[in-house]
Image: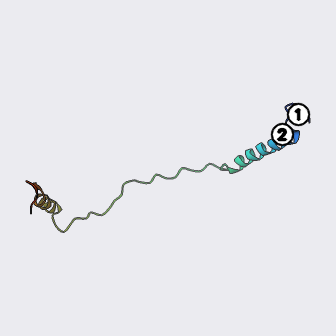
């Protein structure tokens, strides 16, 4: 086989073999049968109800009142 483009015929044959090998590799990697879709999993998390043994908001209010700015700096 003589090439007119200046590329030796053995390089063209090698290129064709590479293309064939890559194509066969892609065909071998595809799944051979239909895979059923995974069942839907609920995104809701049912965590147990937890409550603090004390009133958290009252602690926050006390902290806000204790460390609010008054005049030059903070007061307690």
Give the left or right position of residue 1, taking residue 62 as reference: right
Q: Is residue 9 above or below residue 49?
A: above
Q: Nearer the viewer, residue 2 or 43?
A: 2
Q: Residue at x 10, y 58 (%)?
A: 65
Residue 7 placement (x, y as % from top left): 85, 36
Q: Determine the secondary structure under disc 2.
A: helix
Q: Earlier in the sequence, mark 1 or mark 2?
A: 1
Q: Which of 42 and 62 is in front in this view?
A: 62
Give the left or right position of residue 43, taking residue 11 as reference: left
Quadrant where the N terminus is found in the figure: top right
Q: Residue at x 26, y 63 (%)?
A: 49
Numbered disc total: 2
Q: Is residue 25 above or below residue 6?
A: below
Q: Which residue is drawn at 16% across and 60% down?
A: 60
Quadrant of the image occupied by residue 6: top right
Quadrant where the C terminus is found in the figure: bottom left
Question: Does the CB distance between marks 1 and 2 fall below 8 Å?
Answer: yes
Q: Which of 49 and 13 is in front in this view?
A: 13
Residue 14 placement (x, y as % from top left): 83, 44
Q: Nearer the viewer, residue 20 or 36?
A: 20
Circle number at residue 12: 2
The residue sitting at the right extreme is 1
Quadrant of the image occupied by residue 50: bottom left
The residue sitting at the bottom extreme is 53
Residue labelled with disc 1: 3
Residue 31 placement (x, y as % from top left): 65, 50
Cα separation, mark 1 vs mark 2, equals 9 Å
Q: Determine the secondary structure under disc 1.
A: loop
* Mark 2 burial class by Cα count in 10 Å: few <14, some 14-19, many 20+: few
Q: Which residue is drawn at 84% across and 42% down?
A: 11
């Amino acid at each position: 086989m003589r090439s007119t483009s200046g590329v030796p015929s053995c390089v063209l044959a090698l290129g064709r073999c590479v293309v064939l090998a890559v194509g066969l590799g892609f065909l071998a990697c595809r799944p051979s049968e239909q895979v059923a879709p995974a069942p839907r999993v609920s995104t809701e998390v049912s965590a147990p109800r937890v409550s603090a043994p004390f009133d958290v908001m009252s602690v926050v209010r006390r902290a806000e009142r204790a460390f609010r700015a008054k005049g030059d700096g903070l007061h307690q």
